């Protein structure tokens, strides 16, 4: 009887250990970011904001858009409540896990496609909280091709100076 118990114990220990092994952090981060984009496109506010850390910061495309999670939720909730989200489809993504013993911080950048804006870029920081990867900071930008940069930055300067822009 003891032998049978020992054999069964030895057979189940590797399976139990494997079941508790943490997922590949890059896969987990990609899953979180994909879920973030999916929730935004479906205007699912509760699911969308649950993917952020409580102390998260969202940086939008306008220079004035640096929001705490509470501020960003207040901005986005009226849109989500009307069923109006935003759709960005990841085209390419890079994830780096910080070389910390905890392996609990990562950063990413992703090229995104949008019907409204074409190519955009999302960058950010992820943190591992209670075994779950959360967005700690997200910044959305419009990458400007170098050949257009001078013209675009001149337009921005004129806009900021209160001049009419075209």
Image (spheres, rainbow, N blue to C red):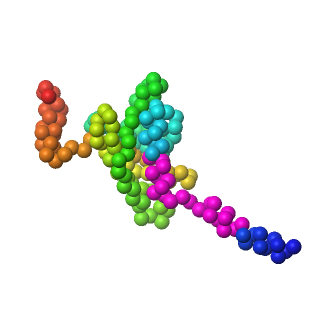
Where is the C terminus found, in terms of image quarters?
top left
Residue visible at 15% across and 42% down?
148
The quadrant in which residue 13 appears is bottom right
Q: Is residue 97 above or below residue 154?
A: below
Residue visible at 37% across and 55% down?
94
Q: Is residue 131 above or below residue 153?
A: below
Residue 156, given in percent of the width and then of the height, sits at 17, 35
Q: Give the left or right position of residue 166, taking residue 122 as reference.
A: left
Residue that protrudes farthest toward the top in the picture: 82
Residue visible at 48% across and 65% down?
101
Q: Is residue 146 magenta?
A: no
Residue 123, given in percent of the width and then of the height, sits at 35, 48
Q: Is residue 108 above or below residue 153?
A: below
Residue 130, given in percent of the width and then of the height, sits at 56, 52
Q: Which residues are magenta?
A: 12-33
Residue visible at 45% across and 42% down?
36
Q: Is residue 33 visible?
A: yes
Where is the N terminus found, in terms of image quarters?
bottom right
């Amino acid at each position: 009887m003891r032998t049978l118990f020992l054999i069964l114990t030895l057979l189940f220990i590797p399976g139990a250990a494997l079941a508790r092994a943490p997922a590949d952090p890059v896969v987990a981060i990609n899953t979180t970011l994909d879920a973030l984009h999916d929730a935004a496109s479906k205007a699912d506010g509760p699911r969308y904001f649950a993917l952020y850390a409580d102390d998260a910061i969202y940086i939008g495309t306008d220079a004035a858009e640096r929001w705490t999670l509470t501020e960003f939720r207040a901005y986005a909730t009226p849109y989500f409540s009307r069923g109006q989200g935003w759709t960005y489809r990841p085209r390419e993504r890079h994830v780096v896990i910080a070389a910390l013993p905890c392996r609990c911080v990562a950063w990413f950048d992703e090229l995104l496609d949008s019907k409204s804006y074409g190519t955009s870029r999302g960058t950010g920081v992820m943190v591992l909280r209670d075994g779950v990867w959360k967005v700690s900071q997200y910044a959305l930008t419009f990458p400007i091709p170098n050949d257009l940069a001078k013209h675009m930055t001149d337009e921005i300067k004129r806009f900021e100076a209160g001049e009419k822009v075209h």
